[in-house]
Image (cartoon, grey):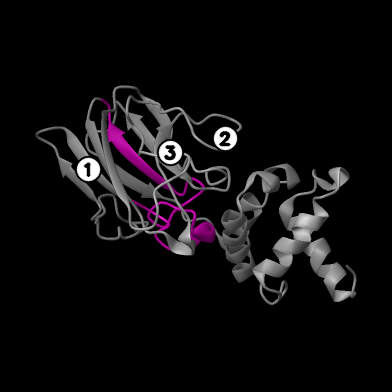
Amino acid sequence: MLACALPVHADETAPAWMKVDADKRTVRLQLVGSADGTNGTMNFNGYAQGEMQVIVPFGWTVHVDFENKGLAALPHSLAIIDPVTPLPIEDGVPAFPRALTVRLVPGLLAGETDSFEFVANKEGRFLFFCGVTGHGVAGMWDYLVVSKEATRPSVQVTRKGAAGETKRLFAYDGHAWRRLGEREKLALLSGFLEEQRPTLPFAPSVYKARLEDFYHYQDRLEIPLDRALFLINEQIGQGGR
């Protein structure tokens, strides 16, 4: 089992979880899914929504060791995909041959590991992406940049503020909510509510049940999740159903 990867600090360019062999033009990345509670536990090494950018020189070999730490008891997977719009709700076509873990959609369970290796022979920006249903679109993605200008692998981090992260995370509507699994819904709500207390004081399960009812009606599916939650909270406060 892999040791849990430590997050990279903003001033680091070569974190402990990245091992470089310049002579062999090889970089080894240790990536941990659900490393902490960031983004409702949907993160790689504690980063989500593109906060982490791994830069690799063109033509180098990239070896990835992936572990699902499994916070919130969620499965996770990893693939290197092109930055398509919109992001796939699940799965994902690898941008490089064999650049993905096993069971991409079902995911690896807590404590499970897998490894893959590929040659970074295409220049551009790609995504580290979780292919489990609903995880990638909920923000479980970061960047891989293959650069002809880079001479050595490095990592850049832009930590987003909580308010900005919340805004992005809940820029999804009822259509996206319906596609999420039960545990994914609770994990997303738990992370959001931690930032919003005491404004939203009730348990995640309470809001989840209300959201299911709220989005039962077709004319409400276009309403973003954050707006729906505040409407539901107001309704609860007024004693409504």
Residue 120 seen by the camera: yes
Q: Is residue 235 above or below residue 74?
A: below
Q: Which residue is mark 2?
A: 87
Checking the image for residue 104, the label placed there is: 3
Magenta range is: 31-58
Q: Position of residue 197 (x, y in %)?
A: 66, 74
Q: Is residue 206 left or right of residue 138?
A: right
Residue 117's place in the image compared with 240, above or below, is above
Q: Residue 99, located in which quarter of the rendered image?
A: top left
N-terminal of the pair, mark 2 or mark 1, is 1
Neighbor class of circle 3 (other Cα within 10 Å; few <14, some 14-19, many 20+) is: many
Give amino acid for label 3. Answer: Leu
Q: Are marks 1 and 3 in contact (CB under 8 Å)?
A: no
- Does residue 44 belong to the magenta stretch? yes
Q: Position of residue 147 (x, y in %)?
A: 32, 29
Of the numbered discs 1 and 3, the one sitting upstream in the chain is 1
